Image (cartoon, coloured by chain):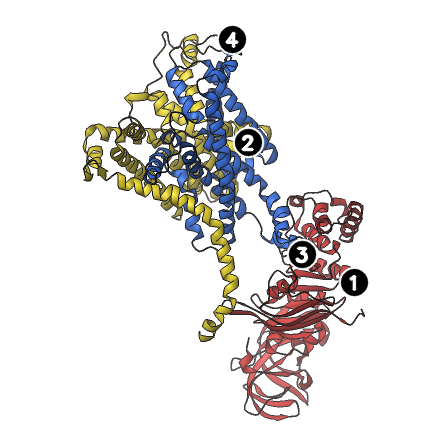
Amino acid sequence: MSESSPHLVVRGVSKRYGPTTVLDHIDLTIRRGELVTLLGPSGCGKTTLLRAIAGLAQPDTGKVELAGRDITHVPPHKRNVGVVFQSYALFPHLTVAGNVAFGLKVRGMARREIDVAVDRALSLVKLGHLASRRISALSGGQQQRVALARAIAVEPDVLLFDEALSALDRKLREEMQVELRRLLQEVKATAIFVTHDQDEALTMSDRVAVMNKGRIEQLAEPRELYLRPASLFALNFVGLSTRISGTVLSADNGKVDVETKVGRLSALGNFQAGSPVIVAARPEQLRIGGEDETNSASGRVRSVVFQGSRTLVEVDAGAGESLLAELSGRDGAIPGVHDEIRLSWPVAETFAFPMEAQA
Amino acid sequence: MTRAAIIVCWVMAIGLALFLIIPLLVIAAASFSPTPVFDLPLTGASTRWYGRIGRLDGFWPSLLLSLQIALLSTVISLVCGTLAAIAIARGKLPGAGIFATALVSPLMMPGLVLGIALLQGFRAVGFTAPWATLLVAHLVITLPYVARTMISGLARFDFTLIEAARTLGCSYPGSVLRVMVPALAPSFLIAGIFSFLASFDNYPVSIFLADVRTKTLPIRMLQYIEEAPDPTLAALSTLILAGTVILLFVSDRVVGLHRMAGTSD
Amino acid sequence: MTEAALSAPVAAPAVDRERLTAVGFVLPSFVIIAGVFALPLMLLLGVSFVDANGLTIANYKRLLGTPYYLWVIWNSLRLGLLTTIIAFLISYPAAFALARARGPLRSVLLATLFLPLAASVIVKAFAWTILLRSDGIVNETLMALGIIEDPIRMIFTETALIVGAVNIFLPFMILPIYAIVAQLDSRYAEAAATLGASPVVTFFRVILPLTLPGIIAGVALVFSLSVSAYVVPTLLIGEKYPTLATTIAKAYLLAREPGFGAAAGVVLLAIAIAVVALSARLSREPK
């Protein structure tokens, strides 16, 4: 099987609980060795999709294929998946090694091979010295590693992480993100992460699926997701942005002119004249000063927040609209609060989204 | 806390411990009485009373009956009570809270009243075989102990553990066996021991269901005490205490007394 | 709304199956509790309104209208109240010491609680008859110490009854209180002290309210057990202290007056239910 051939295929999967549609015809294809994140707010269906892949939730319609095999109706214990649960779900009556060996034992592996595999899994997560410890004697970060070792030890076709890092404190979580990505690439694992944390999604994944209301709004590489959000929801959920509402005046070949309360702006998008839209741009595109061939607006500085390598400036543009600019230290003078300034940004980095899709 | 308060607390605790344990020590001592009038074996001990236990009138059938009823009712209650506790803990049951309260409510009801109620009830439906009525009645005595312990045990059980076992290659029944059973074993043991003891020691319910030939051990013992108390009864009591100590010791090894203090409230 | 109504049947089978399993799981226990507990108690209520001539309230008239039986009811309540109060006064401070105990001392103290709790009531009551006999150990000890000259009569007195009852029901008081006290965060008391509360104020405003759930549970349990105790009064005081429990037993086992016995049972049950209801209400109220 080649590196780029589909490894995990989710086709038209739907799931309802009573009147609520949790998954709405989900299609998702993941290549072998790929790290994909399902990103979205709570209730968007990301965990249900993960559970459907693990076999812990039965979809109402659709198919799930893993490693060339239709597993839609295969029970979880015959799917060869590895799951790292949010609560870790480590067996309290077993030691660290006992937990890691669990999946191998039920697979009927020989004792000696189990010992070797357990040692290898534990040394991968750097916990070899704690093999005989009780679970209750471990810290949260150590438990997280045991859960990972346990899932990896069975050499699953896909590793599934359900908010697996969310219980760790921030510093530890950021360290684990980097380490986990390195480790997964090292063992050439195919993995799906479920998270509501955009930083985790951008750090860990080759591709990110932004989910909302049971649908995948956008499936893209982190860079593309950030630079070319496909929907207002994706724009809002990942990163900061300046957003101004307005009405399309004229449309021309993927470009629209929009009348807004802060002036006339141009943006990328296909709309008919008269459509209500939201015009948006990422804050780092905004610069102080006005140039030709760019969008621009002016206002009074409301707040200046210094964040180390960057400074966020919020400008009150009047009529209830505000602009958010991210200025790096090298951009020269940082304005003060109450200063009147003019901000401009390139048309090619300005997007228009339909108003009614407001998240 | 002030020093005086701390001293009062300790005095009370030590006094309480002595007060609770002394009757048990006395009865054990009296069982070695050299004379038939409960002398403490200060001048010489005798073990002859132990030899006489078996010759007490109707002792063996009563012991056998009490063991049978206690074991069977405990086993049945463990099965029924655990199943009910699982359903209650999973939260898929409408009115689970009310049912949980109903399950443990016999614990707070006077045993004697339950006894006469069952006597009336069994008579009303023509169910009068003493052995069977005793067994059925003891289910109501043991079930609340099991339900209370298992509900609190299951409340601490993380059902994700079963999902984890399934994704690791265990079938559903296999996961229950390998994960849920070991995790709940301590609760199971505590529930079993306390419901066994509750049944084995029960007097107020059994007295109304027993007949001349079918008497549980507590009924028999009360009869001995009222008729002719002698150190033989102290010897029998000491053996029952020793059995209890062994049960508690085993559960302490397996579970820890501290854990039992938390669950038997 | 319409869409929800249309789509509901699609997911219904899965939910139904789970609910059905749950119902199947509780069914055996439900049958036991309903058939061998609730129904017989209702039948008992019915029987208490019946005598040889048919439907009547004569049983209750006799029970609640004759001074003798009012005294009997008072005896039961008195036994319950005295036992509960004394057990509480001993248990409450002791629970704090127990919660502070560590290591082997804690194990020993807990063992002295659990062993009597698990020990047979009849065995313990029997032990007290031995202890309190006129030639028993308590008398011999007191005489040896020169406190008394002649043996005093202890068995078959109210003192004997209360001492025995407190001894037997004490573990049911201290364990629920201990369970709460052991979880009590000492920082509450420290916080109260930093806010300027004296130890006495801290106790009544902070410690006591926080431990109230354990007190309520222990008091309710000990009262409902001791008010209906049968073995203890039978062995330690006998005929001269008739209680509701001994009256019930007599009505059924000797006098063959099921209607009257049932009425006494209903009164005892009512007391127990009142205690449970009151304790449930008290522990629900935010304090």
Point out residue B24 in the picture as x, y percentages from the top left corner.
48, 21
- Point out the frontmost of discs 4 and 2: 4
Mark 1 closeness class: few <14, some 14–19, many ≥20 residues within 10 Å = few
Q: CA distance from mark 3 to mark 2?
A: 47 Å
- Write down the chain letter for disc 3: A
Compared across the picture, whether B60 is left or right of A201 comes to left
Q: CA distance from mark 1 to mark 3?
A: 22 Å
Colour used to depict chain C in the structure image: yellow
Which amino acid type corresponds to the residue marked 3 in the rendered image? His
Which amino acid type corresponds to the residue marked 2 in the rendered image? Ala
Residue C101 is marked as: 2
- Point out the frontmost of discs 3 and 2: 3
- Write down the chain letter for disc 4: B
Pick the quarter of the image with the N terminus of chain C. bottom left
Q: Secondary structure at mark 4?
A: loop
- Write down the chain letter for disc 1: A
Q: CA distance from mark 4 to mark 1?
A: 79 Å
Residue toward you, C228 or A243: C228
Q: Secondary structure at mark 1?
A: loop
Compared across the picture, whether A48 is left or right of A20 comes to right
The answer to which of marks 1 and 3 sits earlier in the sequence is 3
> Are labels 1 and 2 assigned to the same chain?
no
Q: Which residue is mark 3?
A: A77
Residue toward you, A42 or B92: B92
Check contact, mark 1 vs mark 2: CB within 8 A: no
Colour used to depict chain A in the structure image: red
Q: CA distance from mark 3 to mark 4?
A: 68 Å
Which chain's colour is blue?
A: B
Residue A188 is marked as: 1
Residue B42 is marked as: 4
